[in-house]
Image (tube, helix red, strand yellow):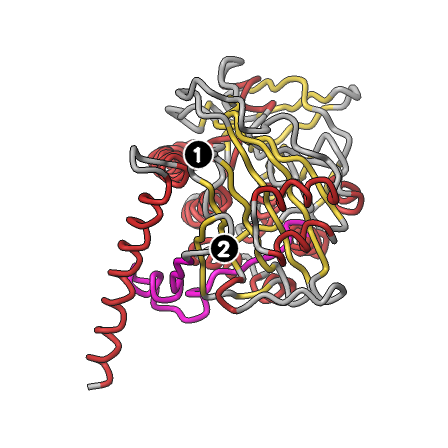
Amino acid sequence: MPTAIIIGSGLVGAATALALNQVGIESVLYDQIDLAQATVDGTPVEFGDSGGGIAIQAGGLRVLRSLGVLDDCKAQGIRLPYTTWAKMDGSSPIVADIIYWNKHSGETDPELQAPLQILRSRLHYVLMKACYKAGIKTFVNKKLIDVKQDATQATAYFADGTTATADFLIGADGIHSATRRKVFGSHLTAKFTGEMGHLSVVNLKDHNIQLKETEGTTFYVDRDKKRFVVAYKVSEELGALRVTTFDDPEEEDQTYRPVSDLPKHAGRLADLLHEWGVPAHVETMMRKSFRMSAASVYDLPDMETYRKDRVILIGDAAHGMVPNAGIGLLTGLEDVGTLLSIFKHYSKVDEFDKALDLYSRIRVARGTEAANRARAMRVRGMAASMFGGGFNHFMFRFVVGVAEVTKFIQEEAEKA
């Protein structure tokens, strides 16, 4: 049976193992930490700690369905049709109908039109449980120190003195990938963007915190001071917050933005949010949070190839990007879906060179495009013109408003 080593047992690594299992390739997951334990105790695992929430759009949902885990994911999360942008105090809300946007973009499957919001740890639990049922082994406390390969095999060397050899190796070890540095070059390191903050999780039901349907995913933005807060539901009973502030490298005056000095205590951070002027329910969500973790945002330089001989990179190891609208995870899941499709056609060992090369050629273009789009969204989201951040918010409202009018006209035409 063909074999593969997967370095990294996070979301994309686990999904990759499930995909390979479908085409008869036996894979083993290796991770330098025990992610199952990290999920329990909230230990930070690069950006988007295991306790944070994530949104999965149609393309990612389609991949999860192909892996046979979509129903389990839906049971652990919540489908929310709206995304809202507002000023920091909640005023001037701009509401977008995401189902309409997805329909307008060509998504015809009703099951995939509403994004899924889910706690990262719950998604990871679903994927790892599916791996366990499939008989896929996972070894933890395996720190990668080297990779050697020849024309037909790749061997991973770990700090504990053990090794693993397979027909090929997949680096799914995140934006700080050791696989990438060892195989593709030590210069390929992610750069800190200057953006950081905190992620938290709160039990909405226990504290009687009510979120309106249009508040299920809301971005509260202060463009002038370069900071924002995202409040969203990740299940019927749980909510999550992301508090972020960052330095503008072109801005000389950095005195008003508490980048490295954000409090690491829910109560003190809630006090800070109160100073920022967030709505009362958002302050309460932070004050009642039962889990918090730091989030430092990195960005990986674009790569020319995701393959070198018998090693390929997938997910953030290949195209780690600044987080925006779930583009990073979506692109990683698309990597998995592409790999699955390729191996369905080239599943024999003597076809692996063709399969790995095709994967890289297809995904480099997509990964680069997605990373650039995430970067552009980050800049536009915090942009403040000479007229101030309020003017940019007004222009954004105008763009979304035009789309909503178009939607109304189309719906009325269909009724007629």
Residue 380 location, quadrant: top left
Q: Which residues are magenta?
A: 93-121
Residue 317 horizontal/vertical position (percent): 53, 31
Residue 268 drawn in magenta: no
Q: Which residue is mark 1?
A: 356
Going from N to C along the chain, the mark reached first, 1 or 2, is 2
Residue 17 location, quadrant: top right
**Amino acid type of disc 2?**
Gly
233 shown above or below 337: below
**Amino acid type of disc 1?**
Leu
Characterize the local packing of mark 2: few (<14), some (14-19) or many (20 or more) Cα atoms within 10 angstroms.
some
Disc 1 or disc 2, which is closer to the eye?
Answer: 2
SS at circle 2: loop
Q: Which residue is mark 2?
A: 90
229 shown above or below 256: below
- Whether residue 350 sits left or right of residue 230 in the image: it is left
Residue 364 horizontal/vertical position (percent): 37, 33
Is residue 54 or residue 6 the one in the foreground? 54
Where is the N terminus found, in terms of image quarters?
top right
Q: Tell me the distance, in whole angstroms, between the alpha carbons under discs 1 and 2.
A: 48 Å
Is residue 361 or residue 237 the one in the foreground? 237
SS at circle 1: helix
> Is any atom of residue 195 visible in this view?
yes
> Is any atom of residue 362 visible in this view?
no
Is residue 281 or residue 59 the one in the foreground? 281
Is residue 43 or residue 172 the one in the foreground? 43
Q: Residue at x 77, y 30 (%)?
A: 141
- Whether residue 345 sits left or right of residue 131 in the image: it is left
Where is the C terminus found, in terms of image quarters?
bottom left
Residue 271 horizontal/vertical position (percent): 68, 43
Characterize the local packing of mark 1: few (<14), some (14-19) or many (20 or more) Cα atoms within 10 angstroms.
many
**Residues at badges 1 and 2 in contact (C-beta under 8 Å)?**
no
